[in-house]
Amino acid sequence: MEYQHQLNMIKTLDVQKGSSYRGDCLFCLNRNTLSVRNENGKLSWKCFHSSCTAKGMASNGVTVDDLQNFMDIKNPPLTSGPIHLFNIPKEFVTVYGNNKARDYISQYELEDTEARLMYDVKQDRIVFLIEENGEVVGAVGRALAEDIVPKWYKYNSCHLPFVAGTNKYIGVVVEDCVSACKVALANLTGIAIMGTSLKEEYVSPIASIIERCFVCLDKDATEKSFKIKDTLSYHLPTYVEMIDKDLKNYSVDELKEWSKKLCETL
């Protein structure tokens, strides 16, 4: 396993100076086997699973981020303009207060997602909240009944895609919010563009939150996948990954194995 690849992946955990991390390994995907420490000017990591060779150390001197913090220069937000907050309607309640909503969460193994999900009692939809810098700026709802149209509904004119996950190194562009949440459960960042076409307003936000991108649309959208790749490649390294089935229909364990193989291609 290449040292630089390991270092790049470890950096996505964003372990702050003077702190440590213990959790699922980014390389072998075994549970709670990876230890990372950022102490005394050194960033060190090791996976304690017998089959994993992840181990290394790097000097942790003054970085660009250190200088930015010193000068109180903040990283730019996803959008260049002012943040327009989304007022959560009173019809939005916890997803666990409705049997159909709970079943939907269970069906796609979203119980452990860090994305903010709610239930719209008026429209009978699972709602995925879109956030920017910790603020809710939009929402997308998925109908729970098949006779409700449209199946996906955007509640406002938010110009950001739905994003799940905090991996700053690798992002995966997918069609819908459920797939994005599933990708995040595999330790990558999922970016839902709500369809098979990339809106121009999504390009800059995507390029600002990840360093590399995989486009993973359904098999019947291959041509559009390469079109999205061509657009994003002007801004960051982008690849098309062909999949056998919709990512949301993979189990979390299957996705973790897929994620591992995906990272090995870089």
Image (cartoon, rainbow, N blue to C red):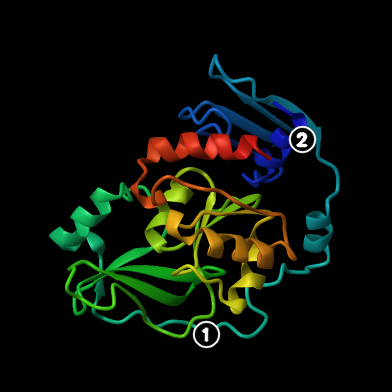
State the residue at coordinates (64%, 61%): 229
Q: Is residue 121 above or below residue 51?
A: below
Percent coordinates x, y for residue 63 in the rendering:
83, 51
Q: How many marks?
A: 2
Say left or right for 257 vs 19: left
Name the residue located 78 percent from the left edge and 68 percent from the top edge. Answer: 72
What is the x, y in percent for residue 133?
Answer: 57, 69
Report whether residue 18 is seen.
no
Task: Choose top left, top right, bottom left or bottom right for residue 251.
Answer: top left
- Depicted 112 relative to depicted 43: above or below: below
Looking at the rendered structure, which numbered label has been put on residue 84? Answer: 1
Q: Secondary structure at mark 1?
A: loop
Instruction: Judge left or right: residue 222 versus residue 144.
Output: right
User: Farthest residue in the top direction?
Assistant: 50
Looking at the rendering, which quadrant does residue 126 occupy?
bottom left
Q: Which residue is tagged 2?
A: 4
> Looking at numbered disc 1 in the image, what kind of residue is underneath it?
His
Q: Are marks 1 and 2 in contact (CB under 8 Å)?
A: no
Disc 1 to disc 2, C-alpha distance: 39 Å
Q: In which quadrant of the rendered image does the N terminus lie?
A: top right
